[in-house]
Image: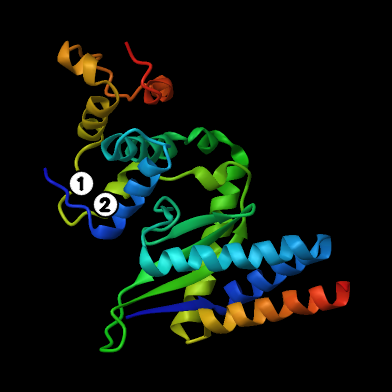
Amino acid sequence: MQVTLDPTQAAILSTLVNQGQYPSMQIALNAALLQLLEDAQNSDVLDNPDYAAWVEQTREQINAARAQIARGEVQPLETVLSDLRAKVQRAKDAAI
Amino acid sequence: MKRFILARDACRDLSNISDYFLERSVEAGDRFVEEFDKKCQYLVRFPYFGKSYSHIDPALRGLPLMGYIIFYQVMMMASRFYESSVAIVTSIKSLKSHSEVRSLLSTFNLQRSPPPSPIAINQNLQKLAFPQRQRNATRTGTGVFPRQYNKYIGMHWR
């Protein structure tokens, strides 16, 4: 199977190689794939009894939020970021 | 063109979390907001950047952010203005180490073609990690990728 990298993907790999973090783009790509596998297999926590409760709580919150999206109870990212930055700025001003 | 929206609960969560960090230090609050912005910019360019949480919900993906997980989903919009949307669904305090959980198969389900079997994935990745071993045509027959492969990434394999 042949996979073609787009210019952005190639630039990312090239940057890592130029920084000296990997000896070649091929090796950098291999490391990325192995990292994906490592993450995927890191499932020891499934045995944790707290985990099932956390999953159930998360699922409920996801469903509630999706219902909000369906009802149009949403905000664009720009508005949310602007509000958050304004709050940080107020905290900075108050700290002076 | 992509559209980026946040559910009402996600806005509330982000506000509460930023308050939490700001109460501890202005720098921490500032860092939380800027890190959140950075991850959102990644998502605008690479919507599937986050890990799949398909074991919780098939469309759910998540990004870790300072001890929390930003849950989101990519939505295809039937609109002539937007080709797709990234919706931040909610932000949840991660149970430590639970944020790293995800399903192997879901990673490969993103491909258009049918996903390869887990065994096939393991065999392909073993070729990546153990090129010399493949030459000897040695088969462990376990179908399980050895967890100790990390040490081979540093080119120390024999």
Pick the quarter of the image with the C terminus of chain B: top left
**Position of residue B12 measured from the top left corner of the image (x, y, whole percent):** 65, 75
**Position of residue B18 measured from the top left corner of the image (x, y, whole percent):** 71, 68
Left or right position of B128 against B89: left
Q: Which mark is residue B109?
A: 2
- Parent chain of label 2: B
Count neighbours of disc 1 (C-alpha within 10 A) and say few if under 14, some if 14 to 19, many if 20 or more: some
A25 or B39, nearer to the observer: A25
Secondary structure, mark 1, is: loop
Count neighbours of disc 2 (C-alpha within 10 A) and say few if under 14, some if 14 to 19, many if 20 or more: few
A72 or B1, nearer to the observer: B1
Q: Which mark is residue B141?
A: none
Q: Is residue B61 above or below residue B148?
A: below
Q: Quadrant of residue A33?
A: top left
Q: Is residue A41 above or below residue B74?
A: above
Q: Residue at x 42, y 50 (%)?
A: B55
**Position of residue B90 measured from the top left corner of the image (x, y, whole percent):** 55, 67
**Position of residue A14 measured from the top left corner of the image (x, y, whole percent):** 32, 47
Q: Residue at x 57, y 65 (%)?
A: B36
Pick the quarter of the image with the N terminus of chain B: bottom left
> Which residue is identified by label 1?
B115
- Parent chain of label 1: B
**Is label 1 in contact with label 2 (beta carbons under 8 Å)?**
yes
Q: Is residue B12 above or below residue B45?
A: below
Q: Is residue A52 above or below residue B3?
A: above
Ranked by sequence position, the earlier of labels 1 and 2 is 2
Q: Quadrant of residue A28?
A: top left
Q: Residue furthest left?
A: A1
How far apart are labels 1 and 2 at the CA level?
6 Å
B119 or A31, nearer to the observer: A31
Amino acid type for the residue under numbered disc 2: Asn
Left or right position of B6 against B130: right
